Image (cartoon, helix red, strand yellow):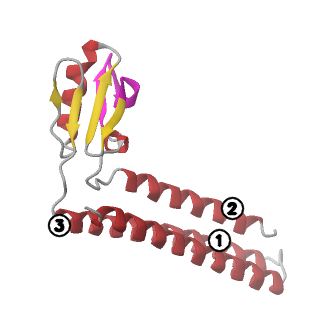
Amino acid sequence: MSNQIVLQAEERMKKTMEHLKSEFMTLKTGRATPAILDTVKVRYYDSDLPVNQLASISIPEPRLIVVTPWEKGALSEIEKAILKADIGITPQNDGKVIRLPVPSLTEERRKDIIKTAKKLTEDHKVEVRNERRDVLELIKKSFSDKKITEDDKFKLQDDLQKTTESYIKKLDEILLQKEKDIMTV
């Protein structure tokens, strides 16, 4: 047993960080982004499909999303799915495309979104710390089973702690950037 378990833990921490980034993409910042539609599933041909599999999504203006279905028959189904998903945007259907005007955020709404972002970040920090705890237990067990020396145990624990602190810091930096994005009018 070498540094391999710390590297595996780091890989899982990295996935946790990437997951936070993807969750942040779905938070509305007052700007149009295709990620707003990531949670919308359209019932079409007896399947629940993401919008991007039934239509092209474009952002012609900073506060406008345009959804252009590849099949005309999908237009009303996409509109229904967007309304049902309750993403806070009312679709405007002109018979060819669906326009989604992204409303500007009030100061109060921005603060609510930041609270949500902070909670998501804290949840992901807990995941990182849980990963550290699990690996620490593995290191201690390896030491008690005489698979590693005491020096190895302390080195692995130190490496693990540094890795954990690094990812906690990265999560905080991601949150800081998201707060800046949300508060920019």
**Label 3 is placed on what type of residue?**
Glu
Quadrant of the image containing the C terminus: bottom left
User: Quick one: quadrant of the N terminus?
Assistant: bottom right
The residue tagged 2 is 8
Residue at the image point whose x is 38% and y is 64% from the top:
178
Using the image, tell me which numbered label, if any, was put on residue 107. Answer: 3
Query: Within the magenta stretch, is there residue 87?
Result: no
Q: Position of residue 77 (x, y in %)?
A: 23, 22
**Disc 3 to disc 2, how far (Cα)?**
42 Å
Whether residue 54 appears in magenta in the rendering, the answer is: yes
Q: How dense is the environment of label 2, judged by Cα within 10 Å: few (below 14), some, or many (20 and up)?
A: few
Residue 89 sits in which quadrant?
A: top left
Q: Which mark is residue 135?
A: 1
At 34% from the left and 44% from the top, the residue drawn is 33
Q: Residue at x 18, y 17 (%)?
A: 95
Q: Is residue 138 above or below residue 154?
A: above
Splitting the image into 4 quarters, where does residue 156 fall?
bottom right
Disc 3 element: helix
